[in-house]
Amino acid sequence: MDILIGTKNDYKADEMLYYLDGVEGINIHFLKDQSIVVDVLEDENTLEENAQKKAIEISKKTDFFVLASDGGVDIPALGEDWNFLKNQRIIGEKRNDVQKAEKLLKMMKGLKGEERKVVFHHALALAKTGKVLWSDQKITETGYIADELPDKNIPKSKWLSHIWYYPEFGKVFNKLDEFELEKVREQSKLLKKGLHKKVAELLAKY
């Protein structure tokens, strides 16, 4: 069973690899290695609908199954200044990773304690030949925005993870070790379990 990771964003691709980790009997391919040209406007009303839309459009151009995603960070304390469906547009898509992190830190200036709480919503969709076979959306992580950048050595496209802080470890996401990563990803296991179940059904069918 061939599954195409439906993004050219390295961070998003890594996340989808995490959700496919442990599945046997699949061959994973990457959109950046394909000659597929597609530009999907993420203008739906939910993250799940955006993920579905991307999976549908990409799957029309390949014989592979396509896994697409969309994610959004909810920051309740920012109120109307923030929209978790439009995180990148609010921060500025053309800024580099350091500039993006610094922009959000500036927006959070003056907020303390629970006001800095953030929640990550993640949606996945699996499609083939223009038809959605499975999709789901869950809250997969909760944390806090750090008071400042720990440093400017940000892994490519992982600017938010560089200021996503876990008080219980005293670290941002990008600094966590394997044991700590497993702990903070507890919430993501329901989404991962759902995807694994669907892939197993498809493997039996195809």
Image: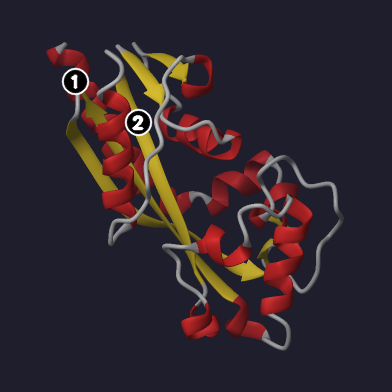
Task: State left or right for residue 25 relative to residue 200.
Answer: right
Badge nearest the viewer, 1 or 2: 2
How many tags in the picture?
2
| Residue at x-position 46% and y-position 34% | 16
| Residue at x-position 68% and y-position 86% | 112
The image quadrant of residue 98 is bottom right
Where is the C terminus found, in terms of image quarters? Answer: top left
SS state under label 2: strand
Q: How crowded is mark 2: few (under 14 residues within 10 Å), some or many (20 or more)?
A: many
Between 197 and 56, the one lying in front of the other is 56
The mark that comes first in sequence, 1 or 2, is: 2
**Three-letter residue code for mark 1:** Leu
| Residue at x-position 37% and y-position 47% | 41
x%, y% of residue 95?
Answer: 70, 55
Between 101 and 57, the one lying in front of the other is 57
Q: How crowded is mark 1: few (under 14 residues within 10 Å), some or many (20 or more)?
A: few
Where is the N terminus found, in terms of image quarters? Answer: top left
The image quadrant of residue 150 is bottom right
x%, y% of residue 179?
Answer: 64, 43
x%, y% of residue 13?
Answer: 52, 32
Marks 1/2: CA distance?
Answer: 13 Å
Residue, disc 2: 67
77 over 59 or under it: above or below = below
**Three-letter residue code for mark 2:** Leu
82 over 143 or under it: above or below = below
Task: State left or right for residue 149 relative to residue 80.
Answer: right
86 over 137 or under it: above or below = below
Coloration mode: secondary structure
The image quadrant of residue 108 is bottom right
Residue, disc 1: 202
